[in-house]
Image (tube, helix red, strand yellow):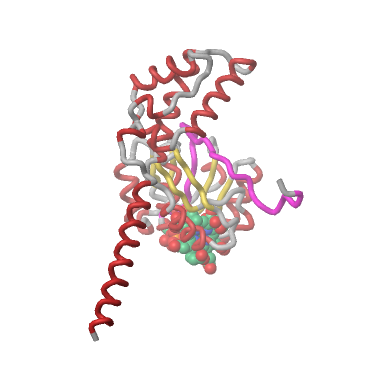
């Protein structure tokens, strides 16, 4: 922990499920806002004249009418904000954007104006998503393109299996809670200790091999046996040591071959020189 905490922003996973949000504008930035928010299952109202729609905005409006209500018109006033849990402006009209932010403030509606960072209640960020795994990279308004580049760096460090592993861990946790129900107290502490130890001891990718049957087996042979944490080897997820070549022998073999080749080359060199 550092003492000089401050100057950042709160990173949260905002829940928008079934809430209503307003997007004013229909250009490229609006299309990105639609894409970013659709992931969270809200009901989206888009206000923008047909003439200014970006093809991707049009595509979303046409294909996601289960979630998106589109009005082919300009913003008409504060009444548009009625019942909204969030408002986003993506306009080529800075004055109007500013005005909408003011209306949102009065109504305590969280608002993001794509063109006025100083007035935003929150910023969007670069995102990496893999099922339930959600990583947001924020430079806190300093360098959006840098956020995008850092995303590419981070993506290279991921195996692509993390999301799947998290899904399996989520299923296992639910099964554990069914087997050992109760909130907080001793049982809560024991569940957390078991899950933490299991996550620490298994490789992340080991979890992807779990299915319904192996999960039940893991709980019966682990949790039910005094909170033991079995090895993935016991479940055939990782091979037993004696069935594979000793991994240490492979580098040793390489060194031995290299050494022998060196000896041979030196001997040949001496023989060649001796002949001259
Ligand atoms: C403050 C913030 C408000 C908000 O939008 O919430 C904001 C504001 C502004 N962006 C501008 C420009 C650019 N934005 C991008 C890209 C992204 N911008 C995003 C977020 C944010 N942009 C928020 C801060 C996030 C943070 O700091 O981390 C990303 C991460 C997420 C997203 O938009 O969903 C997404 C990348 C997603 C990805 O690639 O994964 C690029 C590059 C590109 O397009 O490739 C450029 C051009 C190059 C550059 O400027 O870096 C300008 C005009 C500046 C001007 O006029 O000069 C403003 C307004 C201003 O700064 O005044
Ligand atoms: N936050 C970010 O990442 C970035 C933000 N920006 C800013 O975002 C804003 C939007 O950018 P783009 O989508 O590229 O612009 P754009 O010009 O393509 O789209 C503007 C949209 O606003 C609509 N519009 C204009 N007046 C309106 C009104 N009265 N009511 C309803 N809709 C109206 C237009 O019809 C159009 O659909 C710009 O101000 C730009 O500076 C630009 C790049 C990145």
Residue 77 in the image: above or below residue 146: above
List x then y, in percent, for residue 261. 29, 64
The quarter of the picture where residue 207 lies is top left
Main secondary-structure element of the magenta-colored stretch: loop
Task: Determine if residue 24 is in view.
Answer: yes
List x then y, in percent, for residue 116. 58, 59
State the residue lying farthest toward the front.
Answer: 274
The quarter of the picture where residue 51 lies is bottom left
List x then y, in percent, for residue 158. 42, 48
Residue 85 in the image: above or below residue 182: below
Residue 15 sits inside the magenta stretch: yes
Image point (70%, 54%), residue name:
7
Image point (57%, 25%), residue name:
193
Image point (46%, 49%), residue name:
127
Image point (60%, 54%), residue name:
99
State the residue lying farthest toward the bottom.
Answer: 276
State the residue lying farthest toward the right.
Answer: 3
Residue 8 sits inside the magenta stretch: yes
Query: Which part of the image, by quadrant, shows the C terminus?
Result: bottom left
Residue range corresponding to the magenta coloring: 3-26
Left or right? Give the position of 113 relative to 2: left
As rendered, which of 206 and 59 lies closer to the eye? 206
List x then y, in percent, for residue 165. 40, 35
Task: Determine if residue 114 is in view.
Answer: no
């Amino acid at each position: 922990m550092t003492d000089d905490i401050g100057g950042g922003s709160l990173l949260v996973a905002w829940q928008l499920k079934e809430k209503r949000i307003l997007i004013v504008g229909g250009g490229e930035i609006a299309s990105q806002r639609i894409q970013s928010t659709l992931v969270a299952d809200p009901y989206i109202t888009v206000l923008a004249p047909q003439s200014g729609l970006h093809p991707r905005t049009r595509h979303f409006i046409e294909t996601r009418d289960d979630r998106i209500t589109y009005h082919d018109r300009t913003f008409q006033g504060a009444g548009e904000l009625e019942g909204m849990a969030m408002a986003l402006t993506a306009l080529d009209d800075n004055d109007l954007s500013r005005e909408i932010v003011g209306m949102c403030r009065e109504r305590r509606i969280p608002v993001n104006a794509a063109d006025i960072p100083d007035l935003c209640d929150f910023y969007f960020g670069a995102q990496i998503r893999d099922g339930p795994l959600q990583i947001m990279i924020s430079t806190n308004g300093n360098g959006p393109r840098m956020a995008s580049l850092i995303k590419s760096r981070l993506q290279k460090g991921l195996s692509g299996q993390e999301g799947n592993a998290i899904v399996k861990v989520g299923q296992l946790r639910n099964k554990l809670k069914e087997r050992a129900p109760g909130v907080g107290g001793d049982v809560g502490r024991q569940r957390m200790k078991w899950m933490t130890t299991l996550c620490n001891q298994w490789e992340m990718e080991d979890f992807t091999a779990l299915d319904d049957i192996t999960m039940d087996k893991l709980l019966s042979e682990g949790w039910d046996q005094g909170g033991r944490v079995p090895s993935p080897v016991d479940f055939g997820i990782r091979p037993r040591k004696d069935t594979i070549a000793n991994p240490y022998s492979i580098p040793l073999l390489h060194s031995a071959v290299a050494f022998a080749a060196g000896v041979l080359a030196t001997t040949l060199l001496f023989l060649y020189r001796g002949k001259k």
